[in-house]
């Protein structure tokens, strides 16, 4: 089966590990290729590793996406979350999701420290 969605994640981040673990459990059909970019030589990095670690990235049908668009692609690949992923295609919803994601990124380091404990 060819996977149409690839997700790059920070396997060194306790918060990211928890989220991706949940997504893997929900991805019962194995539609998503999850790639940990925290290692020394991650495979198939489409952009600079540091950029991948700063912001969530996914590829859907070969198109590289970032932020809320990347989350939307991941959600669309998981039947349970597909309605949310389809909603994320709406410009207004996507703008709002990106706004909240950008706010989250500002406090992410502190949340990561809490999640690591």
Image (cartoon, rainbow, N blue to C red):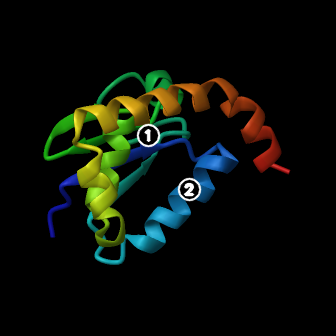
Task: Tell me the SS state at disc 2.
Answer: helix
Residue at 26% over, 58% down:
76
Residue 12 position, x and y percent, is 64, 43
Residue 89 position, x and y percent, is 22, 42
* Foreground: disc 1 or disc 2: 2
User: In which quadrant is the N terminus drawn?
Assistant: bottom left
User: Can you see residue 44?
Assistant: no
* Crowding at mark 1 (Cα within 10 Å: few <14, some 14-19, many 20+): few
Q: Which residue is mark 2?
A: 19
Q: In the drawing, does residue 117 fall left or right of residue 100?
A: right
* Crowding at mark 2 (Cα within 10 Å: few <14, some 14-19, many 20+): few
Q: Where 89 falls versus 107 (above or below)?
A: below
Quick one: which residue is furthest to the bottom in this view?
28
Residue at 79% over, 48% down:
116
Q: In the drawing, does residue 98 fall left or right of residue 22?
A: left
Q: Which residue is mark 1?
A: 42
Q: Are marks 1 and 2 in contact (CB under 8 Å)?
A: no
Task: Tell me the SS state at disc 1.
Answer: loop
Q: How many marks?
A: 2
Residue 32 position, x and y percent, is 31, 60
Quarter of the image for residue 93 reads top left
User: Can you see residue 78?
Assistant: yes
Question: Residue 6 — which label?
Answer: none
Q: Where 98 falls versus 82 (above or below)?
A: above
Residue 43 position, x and y percent, is 37, 42
Quick one: which residue is furthest to the front in this view?
92
Q: Where 26 falls versus 39 (above or below)?
A: below
- Of callouts 1 and 2, the N-terminal one: 2
Residue at 46% over, 63% down:
23
| Mark 1 → mark 2, Cα distance in angstroms | 19 Å
Quick one: which residue is furthest to the right in this view?
117
């Amino acid at each position: 089966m060819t996977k149409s969605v690839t997700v790059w994640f920070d396997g060194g981040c306790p918060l990211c590990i928890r989220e991706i673990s949940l997504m893997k459990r929900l991805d019962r059909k194995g539609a998503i290729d999850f790639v940990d970019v925290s290692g020394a030589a991650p495979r198939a990095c489409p952009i600079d590793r540091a950029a991948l670690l700063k912001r969530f990235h996914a590829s859907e049908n070969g198109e590289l996406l970032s932020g809320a668009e990347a989350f939307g692609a991941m959600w669309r690949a998981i039947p349970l979350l597909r309605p949310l992923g389809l909603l994320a295609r709406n410009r207004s919803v996507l703008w709002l999701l990106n706004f909240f994601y950008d706010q989250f990124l500002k406090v992410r380091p502190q949340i990561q420290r809490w999640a690591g404990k």
